[in-house]
Amino acid sequence: MSSVSQKNPIRLFVCHVWIEDDDYLRVFEYLESTENFFYLNTSTPDKRPPGDKEALRDDLRRQITEAELVIVAASFYRRYMDWAEFQLNCAKAFDKPVVVLEPFGSHDTIAPAVMEMGDEVVPWDKRQIVDAIKRQARHEETTRFDVIEFKLD
């Protein structure tokens, strides 16, 4: 796999039910605030297709097929269990890695079904999210070091 660049962005799908909820939008706030990280969002919550439940499933399959990686917020599973399970099962059927985001701002536990399907679980920390995306989508190890400045008196 080649590294992430503007010409070669990571294609990612964020679980949704055709609603841009707080966690969905927060994912992109975190990604947008990261320098030199390029991605293409294959999820289209703003384009709900007409038709029955099967039409909705087909639309989700298409969005997930186009992605290299699936991201699911643990809270999404709690709110939309059936849709979350469908999307996670699609991810696994299409051999897409899944990054699970811990519940935001709470100490809720992550449902066992989500833990089982997740390839990596990360907190809401932009650096950890981006590193997990790179590891899971492109098998890129990030060798970053924290710089700690201190003065000697």
Image: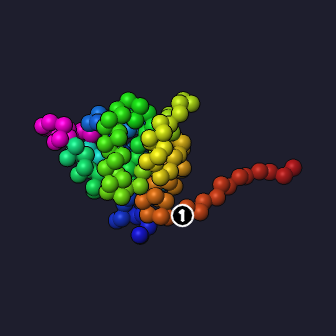
Which residue is situated farthest in the left direction here?
A: 51
Q: Is residue 33 left or right of residue 54?
A: right
Position of residue 21 measured from the top left corner of the image (x, y, whole percent): 35, 32
Front residue (pair 104, 146): 104
- Let me know if residue 100 is in the magenta part: no
Front residue (pair 16, 31): 16
Residue drawn at the location 32% of the way across and 35% of the way down: 82
Q: Determine the image quadrant of residue 17.
A: top left
Position of residue 102 measured from the top left corner of the image (x, y, whole percent): 51, 39
Q: Which residues are magenta?
A: 45-56
Position of residue 104 measured from the top left corner of the image (x, y, whole percent): 50, 34
Position of residue 58 measured from the top left corner of the image (x, y, whole percent): 20, 47
- Number of other residues with Cα within 10 Å of mark 1, as a class: few under 14, some 14 to 19, many 20 or more: few
Q: Is residue 94 left or right of residue 50?
A: right
Residue drawn at the location 12% of the way across and 37% of the way down: 51
Reply above or below: 93 against 59. Answer: below
Q: Is residue 39 visible?
A: no
Residue drawn at the location 29% of the way across and 46% of the way down: 43
Q: Determine the image quadrant of residue 67.
A: bottom left
Residue drawn at the location 32% of the way across and 54% of the way down: 93
Under mark 1, the amino acid is Glu
For the N terminus, the image quarter is: bottom left
- Let me know if residue 47 is in the magenta part: yes
Callout 1: SS: loop
Give the labeled residue for mark 1: 141
Q: Is residue 24 visible?
A: yes
Total tally of numbered discs in the picture:
1
Q: How is the image coloured?
A: rainbow
Which residue is situated farthest in the bottom direction here?
A: 2
